[in-house]
């Protein structure tokens, strides 16, 4: 049987690390519902439980004592921004409950996670994402409700933004090949809980629905990741009516970008706009007039994009820069994808195979998930520690210091740490 032409395209993507600037991943969606009552308090989920002494709390030009709640005196961020104190251990969630809203910006479906007013989440049902929303329309009905893979979020629809604090810098997150806007939910909500407004889109031609659609006989959808980024940056710099709920709280002068695999490659040339760039399993970045800090994240057992690509990408990136490599971790370590399962414990690939979803073989080829890898909860905690440290250092004007001094002691799973000032 002649292979479907999409498989040849995907093979080329994997061989080159990038397809229109990126690697390749597996699976998911961002379609949402508001079912499922919350079982958690404020902050965001995804960080692994930590041990040791209670951390002190730092943010802004000054630091405060170890108050992990939403109370306590505020601290000063960049240009006099008022921020709540956050735990000094940046793997821990911040004091803000995370609000979430789905908007349309320039034709893109965009999820926005943001710092909500403390206490406003009481009695509000948490957001739950149904992965079937990123399947081609012809495939959605194949998977019954009882078998649906669901993604629970420690975030709450339509909370009022915390107008007593801020302004809050913006972080744009770009998913990878066959990903979706909520694919790295544990990271994006973590950032929002620590005082950032995060925007993530389903990128046409790159997300799961469009790629699987080709295997279901649908026409290919063109990618324009550079145009998508321009759309999101324009919305931050001059907020349209869809972002009116953030009025006066969005700091358009401070922007970071993070991306996984193809998404990480897509942001590599955005240093003229973003002050912080965080490519995950995607190599390095190019210099830019605005760029002040780069964090390269890699998984040392990555079967999709070799870890050596992260090492060489780090070497070619401008300083200030850091490289964090997670030992015994795969390509999807910086996402929720390996942990997504239905009520029967079936993962995405198993569900796709059982119900004969178009392109199930494609999803399986990209599903770099191994039982003996470092657990996802640990991967998320390391990622949250490193990413929050660099975001707060530059965009919150956090107190000077070596933000990475304790990461290897806290996480022995960090196999490599490099830093150049």
Image (cartoon, grey):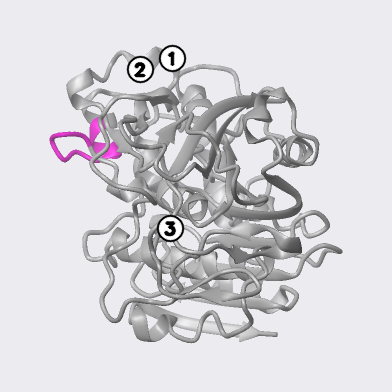
- For label 3, the SS is loop
| Magenta region, residue range | 342-351
**Distance CA(mark 2)–CA(mark 3):** 44 Å
> Which residue is nearer to you in this view: 166 or 385?
166
The residue at which mark 3 appears reads as 71
Most prominent secondary structure in the magenta stretch? loop
Position above or below: 231 against 411: above
Residue 26: percent from the left, percent from the top? 42, 43
What is the total number of numbered labels drawn onto the structure image?
3
The residue at which mark 1 appears reads as 137
Q: Few, some or many C-alpha atoms within 10 Å of disc 2 (few <14, some 14-19, many ≥20)?
A: some
The residue at which mark 2 appears reads as 140
> Which residue is nearer to you in this view: 150 or 159?
159
Q: Nearer the viewer, mark 1 or mark 3?
A: 3
Contact flag, marks 1 and 2 (Cβ < 8 Å):
yes
Residue 362: percent from the left, percent from the top? 40, 38
Position above or below: 195 against 39: below
Residue 414: percent from the left, percent from the top? 40, 78
What residue is at 55 percent from the left and 62 percent from the top? 74
Position above or below: 41 against 277: above
């Amino acid at each position: 049987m002649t292979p479907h032409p999409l498989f040849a395209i995907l093979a080329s993507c994997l061989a080159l690390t990038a397809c229109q600037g990126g690697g390749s991943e597996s699976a998911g969606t961002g379609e949402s519902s508001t079912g499922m009552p919350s079982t958690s308090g404020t902050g965001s989920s995804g960080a692994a439980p930590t041990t040791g002494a209670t951390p002190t709390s730092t943010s802004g030009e000054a630091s405060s004592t170890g108050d992990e709640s939403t109370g306590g005196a505020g601290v000063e961020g960049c240009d006099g921004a008022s921020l709540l104190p956050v735990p000094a251990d940046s793997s821990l969630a911040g004091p803000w409950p995370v609000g979430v809203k789905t908007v349309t910006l320039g034709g893109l479906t965009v999820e926005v996670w943001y710092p909500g007013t403390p206490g406003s989440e009481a009695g509000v049902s948490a957001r739950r994402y149904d992965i079937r929303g990123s399947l081609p329309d012809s495939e959605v009905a194949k998977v019954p409700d009882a078998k649906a893979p669901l993604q629970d979020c420690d975030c709450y629809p339509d909370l009022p933004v915390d107008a007593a604090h801020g302004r809050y810098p913006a972080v744009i997150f770009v998913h990878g090949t066959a990903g979706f806007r909520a694919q790295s939910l544990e990271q994006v909500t973590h950032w929002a809980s620590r005082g950032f407004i995060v925007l993530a889109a389903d990128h046409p031609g790159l997300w799961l629905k469009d790629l699987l659609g080709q295997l279901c006989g649908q026409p290919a959808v063109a990618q324009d990741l550079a145009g998508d980024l321009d759309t999101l940056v324009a919305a931050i710099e001059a907020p349209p009516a869809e972002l009116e709920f953030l009025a006066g709280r969005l700091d358009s002068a401070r922007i970071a970008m993070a991306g996984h695999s193809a998404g990480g490659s897509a942001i590599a040339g955005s240093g003229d706009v973003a002050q912080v760039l965080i490519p995950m399993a995607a190599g390095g970045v190019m210099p830019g007039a605005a760029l002040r800090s780069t964090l390269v994240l890699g998984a040392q057992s990555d079967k999709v994009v070799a870890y050596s690509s992260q090492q060489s990408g780090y070497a070619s990136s401008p300083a200030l820069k850091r490289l964090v490599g997670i030992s015994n971790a795969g390509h999807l370590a910086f996402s929720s994808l390996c942990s997504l399962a239905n009520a029967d414990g079936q993962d995405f690939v198993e569900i796709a195979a059982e119900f004969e979803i178009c392109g199930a073989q494609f999803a399986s080829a990209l599903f770099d998930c191994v039982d003996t890898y470092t657990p996802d909860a640990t991967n998320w905690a390391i990622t949250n520690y490193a990413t929050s440290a660099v975001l707060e250092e530059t965009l919150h004007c956090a107190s000077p210091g070596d933000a990475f001094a304790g990461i290897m002691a806290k996480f022995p799973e960090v196999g490599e740490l490099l830093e150049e000032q």
